[in-house]
Structure formats: structure tokens, C-alpha cells
């Protein structure tokens, strides 16, 4: 019979107990945080494709160092933030909220002084409250403020970990790029130690954008790049997740899950959750897996594919071309060749192929690979390719079923 809850968490960072792999990245980042706790400023940029698990890895490491290394970790999501004042407000608000049930909460309240107000029903929650002029001052005094906080918590916490996640809005801000460089210089040249590890989380193009705005940041960032899961890591994830709710997985069902996940944790949770809802026994078989994967296609398309891309590929002719693109793509390098693809197309498809390629490049789905010659293209991210492969195979099965 169906279980009460799904072990999968689509759309949100992976719970710590379901985290798999990434041992090298975890060790690298943890070592940086430990060095920072001894007073040596550390700056890292956690990079990777959409859906690769950047936020989940940052969250896992934060919990790890909080538990084992006496680190105060703040994981702040900055979606929609474009100003330094709002960034600082969210960081301090996160500090206040994360301290609520901790033994050092009163020290944090003292640190904020009058800049706290009660919110929510019966005033059971607190919020950092500062006016525009005060926030501007806090932007300039960010390092001294963190130094003061560290001193207040010195017997409780050995260092500070601040994770700035979802930095899309700030990555194009010259103010943010210059502030970041000034913060690093200020801390590095001060005689007063600040045990801080600052981790930025974002796509590689966000890092490049910041470097373009402030070239000195190229040598500031320690780049930690996250690669897709290996097949073995994907296998471990599914087996562990289903075993949590007492479900075994048949080998052929597991191979299907691995194939369509494409090494992306985001896809794994969406597919796993959709498949889970189709299970009515203690064993996951190939049939239930196919049914769940078919359901996952539309869910992933709506959630992860840009609306203009989603609309574009609704054309039957373009969907037919896309199925052949997927068929001819090198799944490891995400590369396909024009000449090879043309041999698979019908005459009518060849007539619109030029427009298909142009639009896909304009929408950021594919890009030229000039080092491999003309007519070579690469998918800009693995998530798009994985979705298109899902969609293509689902379409094939629909055609077979209709015959």
C-alpha cells in the first residue's frame, strides 16, 4: 500500500540524511572553514549547473561544521535582492531567526540592541528591524559588526560561516562586486582577526559577471565546482531514499531511474517523487517507474524550463527535431553535430532546422562550440538536456501506445 510520506523533497535543498557523494568538495570546503576559524579569512565560490545540488551541498557542510567544529553558520538566500542594504538586512535577519532556540540567543539580542521587533501571531517570532540610514551604515561596517559578534560568542562559536545563495541579482551589481573586494581588503589588512568563511553560491556565469565588474575578484575566489553525480552515486541515492520507506528497487527499474536523472539531484527528487506516488507494493518495478517518469515530464517542464523555451518546443515539428537532437547528442559532453543530425531529419524538418537552431541559441538552450568547428553545438546546461531526453522518450512511448 502507498506510504504516508515521500522520501523525496523536490524543489528544496536535500535534507542532510539523504545527502550522498561530494566527498572531495565537502572536505575542501570544510577545510577552508576550519582555517577561517583560526583567524584566516576564506572566500569560496560554490559553482555548478542548475539542479546540480549547490544549495544542498552548502547546507550539508553548514550542518556538519556546526555540529562538529563549533561554527556559527548562516545560509542566506538572496533571490530578488539587488542592493547591498537588503543583502545585509537578510544576513542579520537570518542570524536573529537562527539563534531563537539556541543557548546564545540572548547574546545575539544584545548584539542587535533596539533593532528587533516581534512579528507573527502573538509575537512569537522576531525580525531584524533597521531603517535605511542604519542599513547603509551596516553595509560599511559589516566587518566590524561581524568581529563584534564573534567576540560576543567566542566561548560558544569558534568561527563564522556566511553562505550567500541565489546571488543572481547581485552578480550584475558593480556596487556588490566592489563592496566584496573592499571587504576582503579591509579584513586582510586589519590587525584584528576575524574568523570568517564567506561562501557565494551560484552559476559559473555569475562568478564571471562579478570578475568582469571587479577583475581583482578572480584571485579572491577559491572556486569549488560541483560535477554531476556518477551512476554509482545516483544508484546510492535512490536505494537509500526508497529504503527509508521500506521499498526495494528492481534492477531494471533502477537503471531507468539512473538514465533519466542525468546526474542531477534536482531531477532525482522530481523523478523519485513522481515514481513514489505510483508504488502500491514494497517493490518498485519497471512498470511503476515508467508511469512515474511519464508524470515527471510535465512537472519538470513547468518548474525548470523557461516559459519561452517550453512554448517553443510545443510545435510538433520542433519536438520531432528535438527528439533527433537528443538521439545524436553525446550525453557526457552534451554536444551534437549539425551534419550528423541533418541525416536524421525529414525534408520538412530540414526546412525549419535553421530557425530551430537560431531560436534555441537565442533562448540560451544551446551554444556554438567554435573549437570543434562550424556546426557543433552544446547544451548550455545538463538540466535542459535531461528534460528533453525525458520528453523525447515519453513522446516515443505515446506514439507506440497509439499504434
Image (cartoon, rainbow, N blue to C red):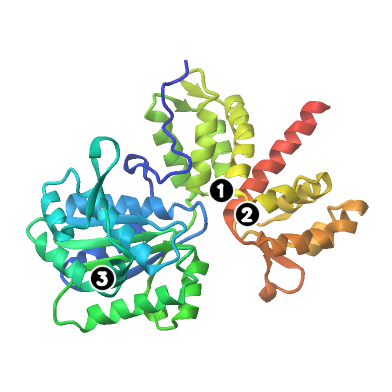
Q: Residue at x 58, y 37 (%)?
A: 256
x and y percentages locating residue 240 in the rendered image: 39, 35
- Determine whether label 1 and label 2 are within 8 Å by CB: yes
| Helix, strand or loop under label 2 | loop
Q: Give the crowd class for mark 3: few <14, some 14-19, many >=20 residues within 10 Å.
A: some
Q: Is residue 10 above or below residue 341?
A: above
Front-lying residue, 40 or 162:
162
Residue under pointer 2: 331
x and y percentages locating residue 57 in the rendered image: 37, 53
Residue furthest to the left in view is 155
Q: Is residue 276 above or below residue 313?
A: above
**Residue 35 seen from this side:** no
| For marks 3 and 2 on the same chain, the one whose residue lies earlier in the sequence | 3
Q: Residue at x 22, y 53 (%)?
A: 116
| For marks 1 and 3 on the same chain, the one whose residue lies earlier in the sequence | 3
242 left or right, relative to 36: right
Q: Give the crowd class for mark 2: few <14, some 14-19, many >=20 residues within 10 Å.
A: some
The answer for how far apart the CA atoms under marks 1 and 2 are is 9 Å
The answer for how far apart the CA atoms under marks 1 and 3 are is 41 Å
Residue under pointer 1: 262
x and y percentages locating residue 24 in the rendered image: 35, 59
x and y percentages locating residue 269 in the rendered image: 48, 40
| Helix, strand or loop under label 3 | helix
Residue under pointer 3: 142
Amino acid at each position: 500500500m502507498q506510504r504516508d510520506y515521500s522520501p523525496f523533497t523536490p524543489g528544496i535543498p536535500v535534507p542532510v540524511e539523504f545527502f550522498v557523494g561530494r566527498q572531495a568538495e565537502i572536505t575542501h570546503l570544510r577545510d577552508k572553514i576550519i582555517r577561517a576559524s583560526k583567524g584566516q579569512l576564506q572566500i569560496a565560490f560554490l559553482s555548478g549547473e542548475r539542479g546540480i545540488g549547490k544549495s544542498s551541498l552548502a547546507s550539508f557542510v553548514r550542518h556538519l561544521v556546526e555540529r562538529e567544529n563549533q561554527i556559527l553558520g548562516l545560509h542566506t538566500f538572496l533571490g530578488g535582492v539587488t542592493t547591498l542594504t537588503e543583502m545585509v538586512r537578510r544576513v542579520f535577519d537570518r542570524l536573529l531567526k537562527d539563534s531563537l532556540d539556541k543557548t546564545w540567543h540572548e547574546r545575539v539580542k544584545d548584539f542587535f540592541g533596539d533593532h528587533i521587533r516581534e512579528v507573527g501571531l502573538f509575537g512569537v517570532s522576531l525580525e531584524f528591524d533597521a531603517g535605511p540610514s542604519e542599513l547603509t551604515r551596516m553595509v560599511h561596517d559589516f566587518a566590524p559588526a561581524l568581529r563584534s559578534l564573534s567576540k560576543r560568542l567566542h566561548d560558544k562559536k569558534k568561527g563564522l560561516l556566511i553562505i550567500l545563495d541565489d546571488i543572481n541579482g547581485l552578480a550584475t551589481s558593480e556596487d556588490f562586486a566592489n563592496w566584496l573586494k573592499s571587504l576582503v581588503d579591509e579584513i586582510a589588512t586589519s590587525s584584528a582577526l576575524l574568523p570568517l568563511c564567506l561562501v557565494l553560491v551560484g552559476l559559473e556565469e555569475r562568478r564571471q559577471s562579478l570578475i568582469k565588474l571587479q577583475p581583482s575578484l578572480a584571485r579572491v575566489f577559491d572556486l569549488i565546482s560541483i560535477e554531476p553525480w556518477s551512476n554509482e552515486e545516483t544508484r546510492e541515492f535512490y536505494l537509500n531514499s526508497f529504503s527509508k520507506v521500506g521499498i526495494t528497487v528492481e534492477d531494471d527499474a533502477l537503471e531507468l531511474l539512473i538514465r533519466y536523472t542525468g546526474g542531477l539531484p534536482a531531477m532525482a527528487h522530481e523523478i523519485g517523487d513522481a515514481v513514489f506516488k505510483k508504488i502500491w507494493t514494497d517493490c518498485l518495478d519497471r512498470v511503476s517507474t515508467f508511469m512515474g517518469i511519464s508524470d515527471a515530464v510535465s512537472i519538470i517542464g513547468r518548474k525548470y524550463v523557461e516559459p519561452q523555451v517550453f512554448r517553443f518546443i510545443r510545435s510538433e515539428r520542433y519536438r520531432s527535431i528535438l527528439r533527433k537532437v537528443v538521439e545524436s547528442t553525446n550525453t557526457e559532453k552534451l554536444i551534437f553535430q549539425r551534419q550528423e543530425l541533418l541525416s536524421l531529419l525529414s525534408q520538412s524538418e530540414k526546412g525549419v532546422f535553421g530557425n530551430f537552431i537560431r531560436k534555441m541559441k537565442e533562448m540560451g538552450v544551446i551554444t556554438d562550440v567554435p573549437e570543434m568547428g562550424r556546426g557543433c553545438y552544446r547544451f548550455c546546461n545538463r538540466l535542459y538536456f535531461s528534460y528533453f531526453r525525458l520528453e523525447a522518450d515519453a513522446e516515443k512511448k505515446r506514439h507506440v501506445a497509439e499504434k
